[in-house]
């Protein structure tokens, strides 16, 4: 009888573990890594200046790794540019922010200061990553998390 109980208990644990693994592989959470955030919308300074999808001047995405490194990839006119560096996540009363520090200067770094840093933050629902570039008249850049293929 004890053997039967042990076998049933083991099978139930294995069954639960397999289901959890399937759920985790599809989880688009800000605490699971790696994360991929893809640009899906740009806005300008004027009402109605929103563009999405292939109408945008370029496509781009960030990959955030568990070891606090990231890559940013921009694709425009059949040209791909990549920049890399390290990041930290800042949790505060104001929300969650990604503070990026690029390892080298690149044309795809978007900020107000012209240095090798970027500041991205999550909207209150934690579903959209936003660039702080629009605080100094840059475009509004909106990123959504997508599964890594």
Image (spheres, grey):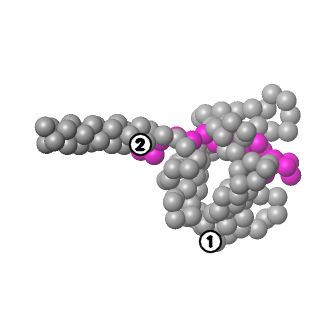
Toward the top, the furthest residue is: 48
Disc 1 is placed on an element classified as loop
Marked residue nearer the N-terminal end (1 or 2): 2
Q: Which residue is under mark 1?
A: 103
Q: Position of residue 129 (x, y in %)?
A: 67, 44
Q: Which residues are magenta?
A: 130-149
Q: Which residue is under mark 2?
A: 25
Task: Give me the residue at 71% from left, 50% from top.
Answer: 96
User: Is residue 149 shown left or right of residue 15?
Assistant: right
User: Is residue 27 shown left or right of residue 21?
Assistant: right
Residue 73 in view in this figure: no
Toward the front, the furthest residue is: 1
Q: Nearer the viewer, residue 104 or 62?
A: 62
Mark 1 Cα-neighbour bin, 10 Å: few <14, some 14–19, many ≥20: few
Q: Position of residue 37 (x, y in %)?
A: 58, 46
Q: Is residue 145 magenta?
A: yes
When the figure is inspected, residue 25 is found, relative to residue 119, above or below; the finding is above
Task: Give me the residue at 66% from left, 40% from top.
Answer: 126
- The N terminus - image quarter: top left
């Amino acid at each position: 009888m004890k053997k039967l109980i042990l076998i049933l208990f083991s099978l139930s644990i294995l069954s639960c573990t397999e289901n959890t693994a399937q759920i985790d592989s599809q989880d688009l959470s800000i605490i699971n890594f790696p994360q991929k955030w893809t640009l899906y919308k740009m806005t300008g300074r004027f009402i109605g200046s929103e563009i999405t999808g292939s109408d945008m001047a370029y496509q781009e995405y960030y990959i955030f790794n568990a070891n606090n490194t990231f890559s940013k990839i921009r694709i425009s006119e059949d040209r791909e540019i990549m920049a890399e560096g390290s990041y930290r996540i800042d949790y505060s009363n104001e929300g969650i922010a990604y503070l990026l520090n690029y390892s080298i200067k690149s044309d795809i770094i978007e900020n107000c200061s012209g240095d090798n840093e970027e500041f991205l933050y999550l909207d209150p629902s934690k579903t959209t990553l936003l660039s702080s570039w629009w605080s100094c008249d840059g475009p509004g850049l909106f990123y959504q998390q997508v599964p890594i293929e």
